[in-house]
Amino acid sequence: MAAETRILFRNIDEPGLASIRTYRRLGGYEAVKKAYQEMEPEQVLHELEESGLRGRGGAGFSMGKKASFLPRGDMDKYLCCNADESEPGAFKDRELMQKNPHQLIEGIIIAARAAGANRCFIFIRGEYDLQGDILDAAVEEAYGAGYLGTDVLGTGQQVKLVVHRGAGAYICGEETALLDSLEGKRGNPRLKPPFPAVQGLYGGPTLINNVETLSNAPHIISSGAEWFKSFGTEQSPGTKVVSVSGDVQRPGNYEVELGVPTKLLINDLAGGPPKGHKVKGFFPGGSSSPVLTGDEGMKLPYSFEAMQEAGSMLGSGSIIVFDETTSVVDLALRTARFYHHESCGKCTPCREGTNWTVKMLERLTRGEATPMDIEVIASVQENIIGHCLCVLGDSMAMPIGAMVKKYRSEFDDKLISQSYSAAAKAA
Amino acid sequence: MSPAEIHSLALEAALREEREPHADPEGVPEPSEVEVPRALRREIQRSMKRYPQKRSASIPALWAVQRRYGWCTPDGIRQAAAVMGVTPAYLESIASFYDLFHLEPTGDHQVLVCTNISCWLRGADELLGAFCEAAETGGPGHSSPDGKVYVRGFECLGACDIAPMVSIDERYYGPLEPADAADAVEQMRMRGEEVLPAKRLEDRGAAGGKRNPADDRITAHTMNKPKRPRPKSAARKKKS
Ligand SMILES: Cc1cc2nc3c(=O)[nH]c(=O)nc-3n(C[C@H](O)[C@H](O)[C@H](O)COP(=O)(O)O)c2cc1C
Ligand code: SF4
Ligand code: FES
């Protein structure tokens, strides 16, 4: 039977879960007590590292390892929770914050112990106004209960937390752009290195993690790394909240062990495409991930390693399904337009590449393109990859490149010569 | 000069330059010369206190201005700049970077129709058309003739589970039919009327429904120790 494995989503629809009372009644904030009163910071860090928890925001980097990169010692250190969630197809953080804000706050307080961070921020996209309000209220409750403040649970450690709302810019999800935006600037990515762990917010050491990553921390601390690793695969331990949308009958967030068959997510949990239709393809990890055809992708396990092996990626864990009625050329145009709109314009290959791709695809959809144009589209993608400051450019190039490669005939069918010959045939 | 002196001179020069960029027609407004409504001043000052550096309050300050005046008016920006001690041009350059700030007047109600992939697959273009038609905006990016309703297309709003969806005055609704547009516009025009109450995102449960029996072996959080270790054999250990 198709089943979810709910850890983060356990009790998700319990009435009142967003309040500290209900959250505590269900065992909440016990992990913070354990982390602050029974464990040393090194032990907390060790447990997180041992768990093998990988970042849920896109890159899949080990959370504990990243926290260990921060220098030790007395200085202002920062923790930024990335709640920008603006990648098309992703909506898991929204449900996690809206329904269980204290789980995230508890995770932040624990991660702050591990990293020695004293000032924390939740950078939430401005569009999530409701969720921002809910977080504001929850943060206030957590201060009131002594989990946040200048003296967390009487240990003398200071952890301050501020909910910071963005104002609409996908690029602010990129971690260094997020830092600039949080410093009150335009959200432009920075050159790396230095990495944020060394020189991040206000020039200080900074840990940046996604909402879902941090929401895992209380569970790892209360039940242990070994327990956590009993879920998922060796390289992808734990569960994942997967956002499934597009041409499926029951779109939504489903929490599963990493490594379950992708088919289980798309067909069993999300109900598959509407009756009489079939999965033509899907983005396995948000709109930035190279598309997989239904035939190649449905049978794969849903894990970081399997998606990478298949030439794609798990990314933020967002599946967008399209059925056979979808024109891949139109899909490519929709995808390219998004990245063109969101490019911050700092690097030429990204700024011009996204612009050109949109223009060429528009010509193609108008039936005005020549065979060379398809080659140009393909080569533009190749020239973007690896040539920019951040991976936004790559994020367009990879899926578009995959679409041209895997559905080439659909692009060819739109060519000028094809429309001429079609017109000639009709005449 | 000592290195410290040189450093402080350089810093001063840098600060001056930052405050007076060449294209900037106005320096930091003199606080005494700009009248700022008390509530607005207090809100911005409160924001500034929340951060180690006051500039971090740029976005919160612009939100405060936009909430008060409906859009980021030149006067409002000047007021915020005076409170923050930065140039109006600085705040304007911030406002122009972010999609949610308006540098021109818009309608009383904001309708953002998501037209990104998942919503597009489920009829977002038709929905955007229906909203424009219902509000008679003459196309996306414009307001209705009475100035009440502003409609624009938007990128993924993070609610593809209710595609096709819209954000109306910062609350989410979906999945919508084109026919819902006329109702929503009418409700927005009537004072105090709830908009599309049956389609609010906040009332939706998780897609997978309530608890499922498989939850029971999950021991996290409420219990500190696993009751029984997960039998490896029964696990879906899918080494491909
Ligand atoms: C263009 C772009 C947008 C991104 N958007 C997000 C986002 O919305 N949320 C997020 O958590 N990470 C996003 N990331 C990834 C972050 O840069 C960063 O890797 C992540 O927040 C680290 O957290 P994690 O290790 O917990 O995943 C984005 C990256 C890029 C290049
Ligand atoms: S790759 Fe694009 S979005 Fe990223 S920094 Fe360069 S121009 Fe900006
Ligand atoms: S595509 Fe419309 S909300 Fe994501």
Image: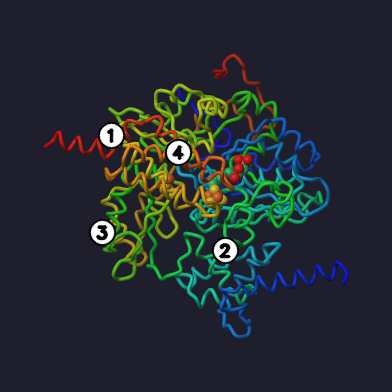
Colour scheme of the picture: rainbow
Give the residue number, with chain letter if any, for mark 1.
A413
Chain ID of residue with mark 2? B
Local packing at callout 3 (Cα closer than 10 Å; few below 14, some 14-19, many 20+) is some
**Camera-side mark, 2 or 4:** 4
Q: Position of residue A68 (x, y in %)?
A: 75, 39
Local packing at callout 2 (Cα closer than 10 Å; few below 14, some 14-19, many 20+) is many
Q: Are marks 1 and 4 on the same chain?
A: yes
Q: Position of residue A204 (x, y in %)?
A: 74, 53
Q: Quadrant of ligand 1?
A: top right
The image's mark for residue A152 is none
Q: Earlier in the sequence, mark 2 or mark 3?
A: 2
Give the residue number, with chain letter if any, for mark 2.
B59
**Camera-side mark, 1 or 4:** 4
The image quadrant where one finds the N terminus of chain A is: top left
C-alpha separation, residue under disc 4 versus residue under disc 3: 41 Å
Give the residue number, with chain letter if any, for mark 3.
B133
Kind of residue at badge 4: Ser
Give the residue number, with chain letter if any, for mark 4.
A379
Q: Position of residue A385 (x, y in %)?
A: 53, 40
Q: What secondary structure is marked by label 3?
A: helix
Chain ID of residue with mark 3? B
Q: Tell me: residue A146, above or below residue B109.
A: above
C-alpha separation, residue under disc 2 versus residue under disc 4: 39 Å
Local packing at callout 1 (Cα closer than 10 Å; few below 14, some 14-19, many 20+) is some
Q: Say left or right for B33 vs B70.
A: right
Q: Say left or right for A365 vs B81.
A: left
Q: What secondary structure is marked by label 1?
A: loop
Q: Position of residue B157 (x, y in %)?
A: 45, 50
Q: What secondary structure is marked by label 2?
A: helix
